[in-house]
Amino acid sequence: MAACRHHSLRFPHHGIVAEVRDYLFAEGDQEARPGLARRPSLSPRERSELARNRAALLRQRMAQTALAVRFAAADTATLLGQQAKLFEQPGRIDYPTEIKRWQALADQAGLIAERWEQRS
C-alpha cells in the first residue's frame, strides 16, 4: 500500500504564529489583569512591520494548506485506484471518474499552492 505523503508535512511556523497572536492580544490581557506593567504603544513603523509579518505568515499558511489538500487528494486518487483493482466488478462507484475528479482536485490545489508561494 502506498504511503500517504500528507502525513509528512510539517508546519514549523506554529510557534511564530502563536508569538504574533500573543503579542497582538497581550495589550488587552494586560488591561484585564491588574499589577502588570503596561506595554508601550507600538510606533506606526512597528505596527506596519508586524502587519507585514502577519500577512507573510498567513500567505505561507495558505500555501501549506493548499499543498496538504493536494497531497491528500492525490493519495485519495491512489487509494481509489487500489480499491478499483480489488473490486473489478462494476459497482455503485465509477472508479475511473472518481479517480479523475480527485486527480483534478490535486492539480488545482497544486496550482493554488504555487500562486500563494509566489506571493510570499
Image (cartoon, rainbow, N blue to C red):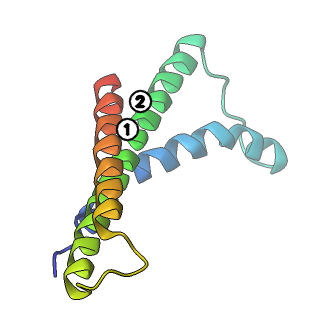
Find residue 12 and report its horizontal and vertical position in percent. 32, 53
Q: Depth check: 105 or 97 in front?
A: 97
> Label 2, on which residue?
56
Relative to 56, 90 lies left or right: left
Mark 2 falls on what kind of element? helix
Q: In which quarter of the image is residue 38?
A: top right
Q: Which amino acid does label 1 sit on?
A: Gln
The one nearer the camera, 94 or 82, is: 94
User: Residue at position x 41%, y 30% from top?
Assistant: 56
93 shown above or below 109: below
Task: Write down the quadrant of residue 7 in the picture.
Answer: bottom left
Q: In this view, does 97 lie to the left or right of 29?
A: left
Q: In which quarter of the image is residue 109?
A: top left
Instruction: Please name whichever residue, 108 or 118, is drawn nearer the observer in this view of the structure.
Output: 108
Q: Tell me if 98 is positioned left or right of 86 in this view.
A: right
User: Marks 1 and 2, Cα distance to the nearest angstrom?
Assistant: 6 Å
Residue 34 makes an appearance in the image: no
Residue found 36% across the figure and 40% down from its top:
63
| Figure quadrant of the C terminus | top left
What kind of residue is marked 2?
Answer: Ala
Secondary structure of the residue carrying tag 1 is helix
Q: 9 above or below 76?
A: above
Which residue is at 28% across, 44% downward? 107
Image location (x, y in percent) of residue 82: 21, 78
In the displayed structure, 114 sits above or below 5; it is above
Mark identifier at residue 60: 1
Q: Are marks 1 and 2 in contact (CB under 8 Å)?
A: yes
| Residue 33 higher or lower than 87, as above or below | above
